[in-house]
Amino acid sequence: QSVLTQPPSVSGAPGQRVTISCTGSSSNIGVGANYDVHWYQQLPGTAPKLLIYSNTNRPSGVPDRFSGSKSGASASLAITGLQAGDEADYYCQSYDSSLSHWVFGGGTKLTVL
Amino acid sequence: EVQLVESGGGLVQPGGSLRLSCAASGFTVSSNYLSWVRQAPGKGLEWVSFIYSDYSDGSTYYADSVKGRFTISRDKSRNTLYLQMSSLRAEDTAVYYCARVITSRPNYFDPWGQGTLVTVSS
Protein backbone atom coordinates (compact mmCIF):
# COMPACT_ATOMS: atom_id res chain seq x y z
CA GLN A 1 0.00 0.00 0.00
CA SER A 2 1.47 3.35 -1.11
CA VAL A 3 1.76 6.26 1.31
CA LEU A 4 0.79 8.49 -1.60
CA THR A 5 -2.76 7.70 -2.71
CA GLN A 6 -3.85 8.04 -6.33
CA PRO A 7 -7.11 6.96 -7.98
CA PRO A 8 -6.55 3.71 -9.89
CA SER A 9 -8.08 5.09 -13.06
CA VAL A 10 -9.47 8.19 -14.71
CA SER A 11 -10.92 8.71 -18.15
CA GLY A 12 -11.96 11.48 -20.49
CA ALA A 13 -12.94 12.15 -24.06
CA PRO A 14 -10.55 13.72 -26.56
CA GLY A 15 -10.27 17.44 -25.98
CA GLN A 16 -11.52 17.26 -22.41
CA ARG A 17 -9.69 18.06 -19.16
CA VAL A 18 -8.88 15.48 -16.51
CA THR A 19 -7.17 15.72 -13.16
CA ILE A 20 -5.29 13.08 -11.19
CA SER A 21 -4.95 13.52 -7.44
CA CYS A 22 -2.13 12.45 -5.14
CA THR A 23 -2.89 12.52 -1.43
CA GLY A 24 -0.28 12.16 1.29
CA SER A 25 0.28 13.04 4.92
CA SER A 26 2.36 15.21 7.22
CA SER A 27 5.33 12.84 6.87
CA ASN A 28 5.62 13.43 3.14
CA ILE A 29 3.83 16.13 1.14
CA GLY A 30 1.63 17.61 3.86
CA VAL A 31 2.27 20.37 6.38
CA GLY A 32 5.19 19.22 8.46
CA ALA A 33 7.58 17.55 6.06
CA ASN A 34 6.12 19.54 3.16
CA TYR A 35 8.12 17.82 0.42
CA ASP A 36 7.45 18.68 -3.20
CA VAL A 37 5.68 16.34 -5.61
CA HIS A 38 6.98 15.13 -8.95
CA TRP A 39 4.97 13.41 -11.68
CA TYR A 40 5.94 10.76 -14.23
CA GLN A 41 4.20 9.49 -17.34
CA GLN A 42 4.63 5.85 -18.33
CA LEU A 43 3.38 5.07 -21.82
CA PRO A 44 2.49 1.42 -22.46
CA GLY A 45 5.58 -0.78 -22.59
CA THR A 46 8.02 2.04 -21.92
CA ALA A 47 10.03 3.46 -19.04
CA PRO A 48 8.66 6.26 -16.87
CA LYS A 49 9.40 9.79 -18.06
CA LEU A 50 9.54 12.92 -15.92
CA LEU A 51 6.46 15.03 -16.59
CA ILE A 52 6.29 17.64 -13.80
CA TYR A 53 8.93 18.42 -11.17
CA SER A 54 8.71 20.38 -7.96
CA ASN A 55 4.92 20.59 -8.00
CA THR A 56 4.46 22.86 -10.99
CA ASN A 57 7.46 22.82 -13.32
CA ARG A 58 7.52 21.23 -16.77
CA PRO A 59 10.80 19.89 -18.20
CA SER A 60 11.74 21.10 -21.63
CA GLY A 61 9.63 19.37 -24.28
CA VAL A 62 6.59 18.66 -22.10
CA PRO A 63 3.52 20.38 -23.59
CA ASP A 64 1.79 23.05 -21.53
CA ARG A 65 -1.35 20.91 -21.64
CA PHE A 66 0.17 19.24 -18.58
CA SER A 67 0.21 21.20 -15.33
CA GLY A 68 0.71 20.44 -11.67
CA SER A 69 -0.36 21.96 -8.40
CA LYS A 70 -0.05 21.26 -4.69
CA SER A 71 -2.02 22.40 -1.68
CA GLY A 72 -1.57 21.03 1.79
CA ALA A 73 -1.34 17.24 1.73
CA SER A 74 -2.67 16.93 -1.81
CA ALA A 75 -1.23 17.43 -5.26
CA SER A 76 -2.87 17.29 -8.65
CA LEU A 77 -1.88 16.72 -12.24
CA ALA A 78 -4.14 18.32 -14.82
CA ILE A 79 -4.20 17.41 -18.48
CA THR A 80 -6.15 19.60 -20.87
CA GLY A 81 -7.00 19.00 -24.52
CA LEU A 82 -6.83 15.23 -24.04
CA GLN A 83 -5.27 13.27 -26.86
CA ALA A 84 -5.18 9.56 -27.62
CA GLY A 85 -1.42 9.65 -27.09
CA ASP A 86 -1.92 10.68 -23.47
CA GLU A 87 -3.15 7.19 -22.58
CA ALA A 88 -0.63 6.08 -20.00
CA ASP A 89 -0.02 5.40 -16.35
CA TYR A 90 0.79 8.45 -14.25
CA TYR A 91 2.72 8.34 -10.97
CA CYS A 92 3.33 10.96 -8.31
CA GLN A 93 6.57 10.81 -6.30
CA SER A 94 7.93 12.41 -3.16
CA TYR A 95 9.87 11.50 -0.02
CA ASP A 96 8.58 10.19 3.28
CA SER A 97 10.43 11.31 6.41
CA SER A 98 9.03 8.46 8.52
CA LEU A 99 10.10 5.78 6.04
CA SER A 100 13.29 7.70 5.16
CA HIS A 101 13.06 6.95 1.48
CA TRP A 102 11.52 8.07 -1.79
CA VAL A 103 7.94 7.02 -2.37
CA PHE A 104 5.63 6.72 -5.35
CA GLY A 105 1.89 6.81 -5.59
CA GLY A 106 0.19 3.62 -6.72
CA GLY A 107 -0.29 5.00 -10.21
CA THR A 108 -3.32 6.12 -12.19
CA LYS A 109 -4.28 4.67 -15.55
CA LEU A 110 -5.62 7.32 -17.92
CA THR A 111 -8.00 6.12 -20.61
CA VAL A 112 -8.95 8.41 -23.49
CA LEU A 113 -12.45 7.39 -24.54
CA GLU B 1 22.26 13.46 -24.90
CA VAL B 2 21.95 11.96 -21.44
CA GLN B 3 21.15 8.25 -21.75
CA LEU B 4 21.06 5.14 -19.58
CA VAL B 5 21.02 1.57 -20.89
CA GLU B 6 20.42 -1.36 -18.54
CA SER B 7 21.45 -4.96 -19.11
CA GLY B 8 21.95 -8.17 -17.18
CA GLY B 9 18.38 -9.21 -16.46
CA GLY B 10 17.15 -12.73 -16.93
CA LEU B 11 15.71 -15.82 -15.31
CA VAL B 12 17.27 -16.87 -12.01
CA GLN B 13 16.29 -19.45 -9.41
CA PRO B 14 15.20 -18.46 -5.92
CA GLY B 15 18.25 -17.95 -3.77
CA GLY B 16 20.40 -17.13 -6.77
CA SER B 17 22.35 -14.02 -7.72
CA LEU B 18 22.40 -11.60 -10.62
CA ARG B 19 24.26 -8.40 -11.45
CA LEU B 20 22.52 -5.63 -13.37
CA SER B 21 24.49 -3.02 -15.31
CA CYS B 22 23.48 0.47 -16.34
CA ALA B 23 25.75 2.11 -18.92
CA ALA B 24 25.60 5.89 -18.87
CA SER B 25 26.35 8.34 -21.66
CA GLY B 26 26.21 12.11 -21.78
CA PHE B 27 27.25 12.44 -18.13
CA THR B 28 29.65 10.84 -15.65
CA VAL B 29 28.31 8.39 -13.08
CA SER B 30 30.91 9.34 -10.50
CA SER B 31 29.75 12.95 -10.28
CA ASN B 32 26.02 12.26 -10.18
CA TYR B 33 23.50 10.74 -7.78
CA LEU B 34 21.95 7.55 -9.18
CA SER B 35 19.19 5.15 -8.24
CA TRP B 36 17.53 1.87 -9.07
CA VAL B 37 13.73 1.68 -9.19
CA ARG B 38 11.77 -1.49 -9.91
CA GLN B 39 8.31 -2.36 -11.16
CA ALA B 40 6.78 -5.77 -10.54
CA PRO B 41 4.59 -7.08 -13.38
CA GLY B 42 1.38 -5.08 -13.53
CA LYS B 43 2.31 -3.12 -10.41
CA GLY B 44 3.56 0.35 -9.53
CA LEU B 45 7.02 1.80 -9.04
CA GLU B 46 9.18 0.97 -6.02
CA TRP B 47 12.42 2.75 -5.13
CA VAL B 48 15.19 0.18 -4.50
CA SER B 49 18.58 1.83 -4.00
CA PHE B 50 20.48 5.12 -4.17
CA ILE B 51 24.13 6.14 -4.37
CA TYR B 52 25.57 9.59 -3.77
CA SER B 53 28.21 11.05 -6.05
CA ASP B 54 31.88 10.63 -5.20
CA TYR B 55 31.93 14.34 -4.29
CA SER B 56 29.26 13.64 -1.66
CA ASP B 57 31.12 10.65 -0.13
CA GLY B 58 29.41 7.99 -2.23
CA SER B 59 27.06 6.79 0.53
CA THR B 60 24.51 4.17 -0.40
CA TYR B 61 20.92 3.58 0.69
CA TYR B 62 18.49 0.70 0.26
CA ALA B 63 14.81 -0.06 0.63
CA ASP B 64 14.13 -2.33 3.61
CA SER B 65 12.89 -5.02 1.22
CA VAL B 66 16.37 -5.44 -0.33
CA LYS B 67 18.71 -4.31 2.46
CA GLY B 68 21.44 -6.83 3.09
CA ARG B 69 20.79 -8.62 -0.21
CA PHE B 70 21.40 -5.95 -2.87
CA THR B 71 24.49 -3.78 -3.38
CA ILE B 72 24.68 -0.67 -5.54
CA SER B 73 28.04 0.38 -6.94
CA ARG B 74 29.64 2.11 -9.93
CA ASP B 75 32.73 1.83 -12.10
CA LYS B 76 34.11 5.23 -13.08
CA SER B 77 36.29 3.80 -15.85
CA ARG B 78 33.31 2.12 -17.52
CA ASN B 79 30.90 4.94 -16.60
CA THR B 80 28.51 2.24 -15.43
CA LEU B 81 26.21 1.74 -12.46
CA TYR B 82 25.63 -1.75 -11.04
CA LEU B 83 23.15 -3.54 -8.84
CA GLN B 84 24.42 -6.80 -7.38
CA MET B 85 21.45 -8.88 -6.27
CA SER B 86 21.76 -11.99 -4.12
CA SER B 87 19.43 -14.29 -2.17
CA LEU B 88 16.81 -13.50 -4.76
CA ARG B 89 13.16 -14.17 -3.99
CA ALA B 90 10.07 -14.53 -6.15
CA GLU B 91 8.93 -11.10 -4.99
CA ASP B 92 12.06 -9.55 -6.54
CA THR B 93 10.64 -10.34 -9.98
CA ALA B 94 10.35 -6.98 -11.72
CA VAL B 95 11.61 -4.67 -14.41
CA TYR B 96 14.58 -2.82 -12.93
CA TYR B 97 15.21 0.74 -14.06
CA CYS B 98 18.27 2.85 -13.37
CA ALA B 99 17.82 6.59 -13.21
CA ARG B 100 19.89 9.68 -12.68
CA VAL B 101 18.82 11.52 -9.56
CA ILE B 102 18.30 15.27 -9.73
CA THR B 103 18.86 17.17 -6.50
CA SER B 104 15.71 18.81 -5.25
CA ARG B 105 13.43 18.63 -2.23
CA PRO B 106 12.90 15.82 -2.64
CA ASN B 107 15.21 14.43 -5.31
CA TYR B 108 13.60 13.19 -8.48
CA PHE B 109 14.54 10.77 -11.25
CA ASP B 110 15.50 11.90 -14.75
CA PRO B 111 16.15 10.32 -17.12
CA TRP B 112 15.36 6.62 -16.77
CA GLY B 113 16.84 3.71 -18.65
CA GLN B 114 14.64 1.40 -20.70
CA GLY B 115 14.65 -1.25 -17.94
CA THR B 116 15.77 -4.85 -17.68
CA LEU B 117 13.50 -7.72 -16.59
CA VAL B 118 14.50 -9.97 -13.72
CA THR B 119 12.44 -13.12 -13.22
CA VAL B 120 12.99 -15.19 -10.09
CA SER B 121 11.46 -18.60 -10.53
CA SER B 122 12.31 -22.28 -10.32
Image: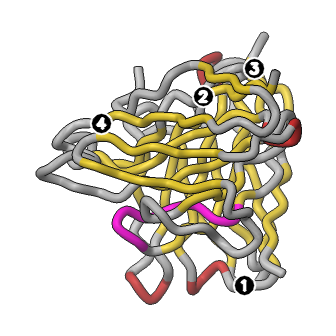
- The front one of B21 and B26 is B26
Say which amino acid is labelled 4. Answer: Gly
* Residue range highlighted in magenta: B104-111
- The front one of A72 and B12 is A72
Say yes or no: labels 2 and 1 on the same chain. no
Instruction: Identify the element where label 4 is drawn.
Output: loop
Q: Which residue is mark 1?
A: B27
Say which amino acid is labelled 1. Answer: Phe
Quote the CA–CA distance across marks 3 and 2: 32 Å
Q: Label for residue A24? A: 4
Instruction: Identify the element where label 1 is drawn.
Output: loop
Say which amino acid is labelled 2. Answer: Thr
Quote the CA–CA distance across marks 3 and 4: 37 Å
Task: Give the left or right position of residue B56, taking residue B83 as reference.
Answer: left
Q: Residue furthest top?
A: B122
Q: Is residue B68 visible?
A: no
Say yes or no: labels 3 and 4 on the same chain. no
- The label nearer to you, 4 versus 1, is 4
